[in-house]
Amino acid sequence: MRRLFTPEDALQQGVTRAALRWGERQQTWRRAVRGVYADGPEPVSAVDLARAKVIQSCSVARGRLAGVLHDLDSVRLAGREGRLPPLVCASVVCIDGVPCAEGTQTMIDLAAALDDATWEQALECALRRQLTTIAEIDAQLPALGRAKAPGTARIRRVLDRRPRCVVPTGSLLETAMVQVARGIEGLPDPVRQLRIENEYGEFVAFVDLAWPELGIFIELDGQHHKDQPVYDSSRETAVVAATGWLCGRFTWHEVIDLPAFARRRLARIVQQARLRPIVNQ
């Protein structure tokens, strides 16, 4: 992120206050708030401003700002946040020079600010990056409930919907596809990152999501797949050859922008799979 600094920081680098004012006039840096500057000539962004206010007030970034600093999936700055839950984790991390609540506290704070789907997407990202664990969040629920902390009901709903023992999804796209699949009546949560082997026990591939009991696997094409269609096709062929399963391939645009369409497509694949004999791996 863009570097922020105070006059004291500048002085340690040999930049006097007069030189600091001159640099501001020359747009070598910009004043973000009183006593905090942002490197470079670009206008001060909303994130720059929010970070600068934390530095100015000698406080700690929490809520949406902490989610942005941790680079959690789907978290964006918005208007004024409501009441934050009580501080349950005293530890603080420093991200690009800004003191920030650690992962568990950030997820608890975000539960008061996001809807269920967005909080789950941020949660899977936090778990994937080992910023928190389900056990750590679970351990805080009794105290949060007694304090009537905002977002507590959301945390319980999402955690109860998500099997505690499953691995995190591999990407935002996978999380969104799991959420799409939940809209199909009678369809359980898929197995994530399933290892596929052939009849000789040799490794074939990991598939993004699968329903082994139905003989279905899902391949998701994010932006990083656009330059490797031959590899993706051969990988899919190898998995089908090893399992005999049906494959559903979905793009970012379908899952993220057209979830109802993606759900209908997946429902048709599920219906087709239920009409054919189950092929065991």
Image: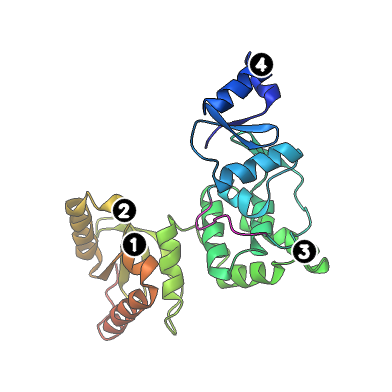
Disc 3: which residue: 144
Q: Secondary structure at mark 3?
A: helix
Q: Quadrant of the C terminus?
A: bottom left
Q: Residue at left 68%, top 58%?
A: 109
Instruction: Determine the image quadrant of residue 262.
Output: bottom left
| Magenta span contains residue 79 | yes
- Residue flagged by tag 3: what amino acid is it? Leu
| Magenta span contains residue 124 | no
Residue 222, how many percent across, how many down?
33, 56
Against 217, is 71 above or below?
A: above
Residue 16 has which mark?
A: 4
Q: CA distance from mark 1 to mark 2?
A: 7 Å
Q: CA distance from mark 4 to mark 2?
A: 46 Å
Residue 223 has which mark?
A: 2
Against 38, is 213 above or below?
A: below
- Residue flagged by tag 2: what amino acid is it? Gln
